Amino acid sequence: MPTVEELQHKVKELEAKLASIQGNAGPVRQKIDVMSSEVVDSNPYSRLMALKRMGIVDNYEKIRDLSVAVVGVGGVGSVTAEMLTRCGIGKLILFDYDKVELANMNRLFFQPHQAGLSKVDAAAATLQNINPDVQIDAYNYNITTVDNFQKFCDTISTGSLTSGPVDLVLSCVDNFEARMAINTACNELKQKWFESGVSENAVSGHIQFIVPGETACFACAPPLVVASKIDEKTLKREGVCAASLPTTMGIVAGFLVQNTLKHLLGFGNVTHYLGYSALTDFFPTMSLKPNPHCDDPYCRTRQTEARARPLVEVATEVLEDTKPLHDENEWGISLVDENSPVEETPTNLNLAEGIQVAYNIPVDNSTPESSTGGAVAASELSLEELMAQMKSM
Amino acid sequence: MPTVEELQHKVKELEAKLASIQGNAGPVRQKIDVMSSEVVDSNPYSRLMALKRMGIVDNYEKIRDLSVAVVGVGGVGSVTAEMLTRCGIGKLILFDYDKVELANMNRLFFQPHQAGLSKVDAAAATLQNINPDVQIDAYNYNITTVDNFQKFCDTISTGSLTSGPVDLVLSCVDNFEARMAINTACNELKQKWFESGVSENAVSGHIQFIVPGETACFACAPPLVVASKIDEKTLKREGVCAASLPTTMGIVAGFLVQNTLKHLLGFGNVTHYLGYSALTDFFPTMSLKPNPHCDDPYCRTRQTEARARPLVEVATEVLEDTKPLHDENEWGISLVDENSPVEETPTNLNLAEGIQVAYNIPVDNSTPESSTGGAVAASELSLEELMAQMKSM
């Protein structure tokens, strides 16, 4: 039987170990009231506030007043949340309903000791430890059920630091159903958001900025290929094991948060659609006008509202360089290339069981063209690339 | 005075907490002998091995035989090391001589509880916890001193898992002196390496693949602007506080490791020079031929050796698409644009005290042009952009 002294020594030793690691010992650094530019080793914000002196951002401190919702805390969402946390975002709202698994360890952020914990709880604990100044709310539910969808809508419309709508929603989900739920909510709530995605073969990805009524929503140009007959989740879990890489997911998260910062803090040009093809380091950009015949009635309403607004307002938004070259190209998206007839494309698709082409790609004579976006070297996505991307959503 | 029972309970509680966190309780997952493709939640490699089924990589397991040295474990290097660790690289060799500070918390990877620890030790502990299968060696010294430079050369020439040279060196350092040291070592040792960098204003960065004798080395096209009279470190610490963002650094690390994987595992096309300009989402690519008059004698020797080799060997390397359009463009780099005479450029430079233009930019009549790289949309860097980038090294 150990003595009281021995046990007291053991307790002290364990407490010291715990303190030296993290977590339950409480945040290591104290909250900081005001972001300072002071150049000292102990200031976690000096390198961010330096963006002002460098002439990049006028008012970096504004970030503390802003709130962002991150839906999906997986390979892209967790890194997205970490970047925003380290940038000192005012409030972060996390949604996910999955658990951390060892199978997630090929992506950044989660660590093996977190296996079995809910992703949002594990993420919130780590993020709060990294930056105690950020207010973090975590919601552990599936936003696509009827009840939860309403809770989701309520949360993003009252989730700001002043109980108004959040400043931005970032979609980091990995399936069609969840993207459609976010799209529906954001169209109804007039909520700006970014969609993001990584392909099943892990070597391409994209981000897309969606301003309801002003740019194509997710339902305006839906994926060409969707799961049919079987539940997407079943497909994902038991059938196809998608490949993933920490590189591609980290890069997509980087693009997502970089464009989020540009939009929220007003510097640089926000890119509407930025793709990434890892095999060739190819970065297509596009601008997507909303589809006047979009299935989502709220999208059509937002389009009517946008048309009623003076053009100047649109021009001061990020849209200034994004008008399609031809008015008759209503989607502003180039799916059809005369050199690669759509008839040939299906032979390139290697569809797994339970996957089908969602609809025939319309061929019309209006010669769709993608528009070019200012200083951005705009490029057309090949149909194959687009289908591969969309197939993987 | 607490009772023995109370203390025993307390000890158990603390031990459970420790176990639930990480670290000193030992790695949470056991080592895994063979990489498996099995699709189960407990397999940390299933999503990487899926790259084979997806037709991206022929032999992913090969990564376990490979060793990579990461020099500089800061904003780019730490994320680089984490990505390689999660990808299951065989061996990782880390070099740095700095300590973690709270001022680093605006970048990914390190956490506040690690403040004060050496970067290599803190990184090695975290990385080993993430993936116990990776062999991690950590060297806490400055590679630019005479003694340490020799130790550095010895380590990279005997650092592989079979005591041969490492498979790749990744430069993630933040100053000219350290880059030159790596360049000198790699030219002497015929060691392929990647250089990387992020600008002082945090909104641009680049990676560059250097194959001694075949592509421009760091001394072939040195920075146009360097620190003079004052020690770079003094400048960095007390004078200018460079801005940094977790986004830009994460993206550059992603590009670096993605191209590392492409090179080491033989898929896709390795990009020679990939730039990133965050403000416009612009991604210039270039190919840089070595300078026959390079100051580094080992570089000139490697060039002679490369010319003596049959061309086929070069063509099977990543260089196939990278020959400059005109032979007389010996550098393969476009610094001079007829529309923007170099005479005007110095007025655009806002040089801080202690910084000077290193030399006059040579204007010759050979009309330098950048070459285009295969499917990559090659773009010419403007002189301003190039100078801004190089200024920040």
Image (cartoon, coloured by chain):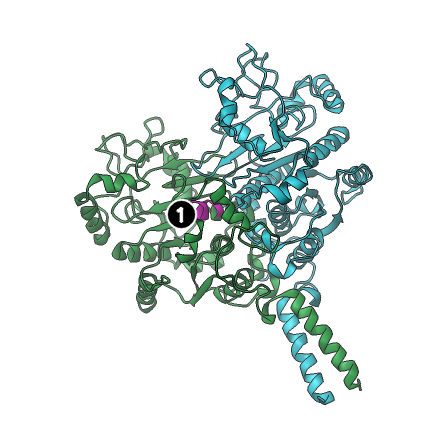
Chain colours: A cyan, B green
Q: Residue furthest top?
A: A365
**Front-most of residues A307 and A292:** A292
**Front-most of residues B372 and B34:** B34
Q: Is residue A185 visible?
A: yes
- Mark 1 nearby-residue class (10 Å; few <14, some 14–19, many ≥20): some
Q: Residue at x 57, y 65 (%)?
A: B115
What segment carries the magenta color? B254-260
In the rendered image, residue B351, in percent from the top left (x then y), is placed at 42, 46
Q: Residue furthest front?
A: A353
Q: Secondary structure at mark 1?
A: helix
Q: Residue at x 60, y 52 (%)?
A: B40
> How many numbered discs?
1
In the rendered image, residue B72, in percent from the top left (x then y), is placed at 44, 58
Residue hosting label 1: B265
In this view, A310 is above or below B346: above
Callout 1, which amino acid? Leu
